[in-house]
Image (tube, rainbow, N blue to C red):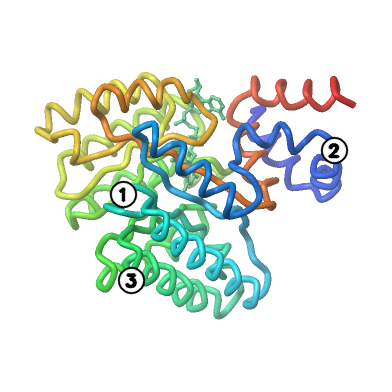
Amino acid sequence: MLRRTMLAVSASDRIRQIITAAPYARDVVARFVAGEGQDDALRVTGQLLGRGLLVTLDHLGEHTTDPDQAAVAAGEYIGVLGRLAAAGHARGGAAEVSVKPTAVGLGLGEHGEKTATENIARICAAAEAAGTTVTLDMEEHDKVEAVLRIHRELRGEFVTLGCVIQSYLRRSESDCAALARAGLRVRLCKGAYDAPAEVAFTDRRDVDRCYVRCLRSLLAGSGYPMVATHDPRLIEIAGTQAILAGRPVEAFEYQMLYGIRPVEQRRLAASGAQVRVYVPYGSDWYGYLTRRLAERPANLAFFLRSLASRR
Ligand code: FDA
């Protein structure tokens, strides 16, 4: 309930203005975001790789409203991929990128899908040249069909292009089954957006149950599962299911968000598992931050306390 309210309230322009203008907001944001520019992204990537973790970089921004902006967003990815390669961070896919389809044009009306497909193809070509991969983030439920279509269209040429499945959607079990058979890179998460009961489970227990069913299908399939969760129970289930499915540690990976359960990230990596950290950077942090706050009341309290105590 709090999560839905929080996601709804955060859509207000007035609230956005208040939060983004708050004097100490940026200090709090720093817990979840690497910084505003490529230098920050490269610095944090180097630190995480040095600790034995893998990285996926996300340039913050979503729901781009004009084609030029969408091209600029794609250019940002191409630029950062070049810098990852130059620093040796892209080698073997150690650091890759995650792309939100609406950041590169998906929401641009009639030609949105075509624009997004072309921009994502440019990013994939740059990633291939850098020796690394791209994963398409999944956004609101009404974008799922288009994103999976883009993924299908491009994966013939870019075989390592990954996509995300959200276990809160009722359709996801069958999507996972199809993607697992096709041998693809699939990130499984619970889902961070608001979605109506016709398409999404509303009880957290049902979301978790669906996560486990999807996990089983991906681990038993021929692809490369990316287990994106901070949930201790699901992490344990994933480890056990991977053993039962006969998957060695290099045949799947865990993924967590930058700033969330960093001790667990290092513990898993020290145990021999592959762990990738999703690292956002950029100045357009509002949407990302409010989704993180909505997930966890303790984060919201931390954020409000920080704003209040440092005025
Ligand atoms: P859940 O929210 O149930 O949390 C389980 C436990 O994890 C909590 O009890 C707490 O200990 C810890 N925890 C979780 N969130 C926390 C937070 N914000 N702060 C502190 N502790 C927290 N979603 C989406 O819709 N599309 C996408 O493309 C992606 N991509 C993505 C990539 C990666 C690498 C990750 C890890 C997640 C995503 N997500 C996403 C977000 C995902 O859908 C989900 O909203 C969050 O991961 C939180 O869900 P958990 O699975 O962690 O479980």
Q: In the image, is residue 66 above or below residue 12?
A: below
Residue underneath mark 2: 22
Residue under the point 50% across and 45% down = 198
Q: Earlier in the sequence, mark 1 or mark 2?
A: 2
Q: How would you rate the neighbour count of disc 3 (Cα within 10 Å): few for under 14, some for 14-19, many for 20 or more?
A: some
Q: Amino acid at mark 2?
A: Ala
Q: Amino acid at mark 1?
A: Val
Q: In the image, is residue 199 above or below residue 76?
A: above
Q: Amino acid at mark 3?
A: Leu
Q: How would you rate the neighbour count of disc 2 (Cα within 10 Å): few for under 14, some for 14-19, many for 20 or more?
A: few
* Badge 1 element: strand
Residue depth check, mark 2 versus mark 3: number of the one nearer the observer = 2
Pinpoint residue 89: horizontal percent, then vertical percent: 38, 51
Residue underneath mark 3: 154
Q: Earlier in the sequence, mark 1 or mark 3?
A: 3
Q: Are marks 1 and 3 in contact (CB under 8 Å)?
A: no
Pinpoint residue 117: horizontal percent, then vertical percent: 44, 73
Q: Is residue 287 left or right of residue 119?
A: right
Pinpoint residue 203: horizontal percent, then vertical percent: 49, 28
Q: Which mark is residue 186?
A: 1
